[in-house]
Amino acid sequence: MSKMIIDTDTGSDDAIALLMAVAHPDAEVVALTTVAGNVALDQATRNAKTTLRIAGRPDIPVFVGCDRPLVYPLETATEVHGDDGLGNVHLPDAGIDSQPEHAVLALVRLAAESNGEHDLITLGPLTNVAAALAIDPDLLTRFRRTVVMGGAPDMVGNVTDMAEFNVWVDPEAAARVFVAPGERVMVGWNVSMTAGLVSPDQRKAMAELGTAAGQFAHDITSVVEAFCHQELGIPFFSLPDPLAVAIALDDTIATRTQSIGVTVGRSAEARGATFPTHLQPDAPATDIVWEADAEAFQAQMFAALSALP
Ligand code: BDR
Ligand code: CA
C-alpha cells in the first residue's frame, strides 16, 4: 500500500491525477495540500474539493497553502484550463471544509509522521514545499520520495522556450526543492508530451465509460483540448499531472530515467529553466524521467475512471 500526500494547484489535469490516486487499489491518499498556480488559491482549493466529491472521498483532508509564489507575483494558466481551472464546468461548491492547519505546517507534520513511508507528489508550483523546507530542511528525507511534476530537462518549455509552468511560476521555490536532501523524481513537460498525450477519441472514450468520474474528466478537458488545437495547432493535449501520479503509483511506467543534479534558472532569460548538471557529479540528484510507457499510463487512467462512481 503506498501512502501519499498530494500538493496541487488543481487545474484540469491535476483533477484527473487526483482521481487516479484516489481510485488506485494499492494507494491511500493521506491528504491534499493546495497551492496557487493554475488558478488562484481559493479556486484551486475549491477544485480539489470538487474532485474529491466526484470521487466519493470527501473524507480526505484538504489543507490550504500559499496564495502566491515566494518572489514573483502569481501568474495563472486559465487560458489553458478555463476560468475556473476545470474547463469552465462551474460545478457547485462541494461542501467540504478545509482543515484549520496551514498546508505548510501540515506538510512538516505529515513528513514527521511518515516514517519514510509516504510519497509526496507535487502537481503545482513548489511554494508550499519550499516554505516547509524553510522550517524543516530535511523534510524530503522524511518521505519515501518526492515525485515532482515540473521542469523541462530537454529545455523545451511550455511558458517560455526553456521553462515549464510549475517551475516558471515559482523558480525560487523550485531551486530550493531540487537541492534539498532526499529522493526525488522529476516528471517533466518533456515526457508528458510523448507518453501523456490524449487524442479527441481517447477523450470521448472517457465520457463513454458511463461513470461520473469519466464524464467529469471529459468535461474538464474541453478548454485544454481547444487551446491545443486552436493556439498550438496540435490535435491532442497532454496530461502531465496524471502521468506523474501514474509513475508514482507504478514505477515501471517510467521506462528510462537518469539520476543527475538539476539547477533552476533564475536570471530573466532563463527563469524557470531546469538544467541537468552534467558537469557537477556531486550535485544533489534527481531521477529525471526521460521516457515512459504511454499505453500503461492510459490503462491506469482508464482503469481509475472506470472504477470510480
Ligand atoms: C503543469 O502546469 C499546469 O498547467 C499543469 O497542471 C501541470 O501541473 C504543466 O506545465
Ligand atoms: Ca498542476
Image (cartoon, rainbow, N blue to C red):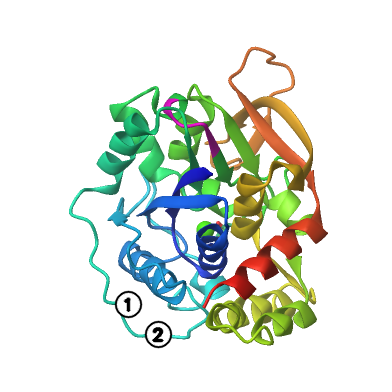
Instruction: Give me the residue at 40% from left, 28% from top.
Output: 115
Q: Camera-side residue: 2 or 276?
A: 2
The segment highlighted magenta reads: 142-146
Q: Camera-side residue: 269 or 10?
A: 10
x and y percent of residue 301 in the render? 67, 65
Instruction: Determine which residue is flagged by label 1.
Output: 94
Q: Cβ of disc 1 within 8 Å of ligand 2?
A: no
- Residues packed near mark 2 inside 10 Å, few (<14), some (14 to 19) or many (20 plus): few
Q: Amino acid at mark 2?
A: Leu
In the image, is residue 175 part of the stretch drawn in magenta?
no
Horizontal side of 199 relative to 81 (left or right) equals right
Image: 201 above or below 56: below
x and y percent of residue 150 in the render? 59, 47
Q: Secondary structure at mark 2?
A: loop
x and y percent of residue 181 in the render? 49, 21
Q: Amino acid at mark 1?
A: Ala
Image: 138 above or below 253: above
The answer to which quarter of the image holds residue 39 is: bottom left
The answer to which quarter of the image holds residue 133 is: top left
Horizontal side of 209 relative to 51 (left or right) equals right
The numbered disc on residue 238 is none
The answer to which quarter of the image holds residue 277 is: top right
Q: Is residue 163 visible?
A: no
Instruction: Give me the residue at 59% from left, 80% from top.
Output: 223
- Residues at marks 1 and 2, CA–CA distance in whole angstroms: 8 Å
Single out the residue that lies furthest toward the left: 100
Instruction: Determine which residue is flagged by label 2.
Output: 91
Label 1 or label 2, whichever lies nearer to me, is 1
Instruction: Give me the residue at 62% from left, 36% from top.
Output: 185
Q: Is residue 298 visible?
A: yes
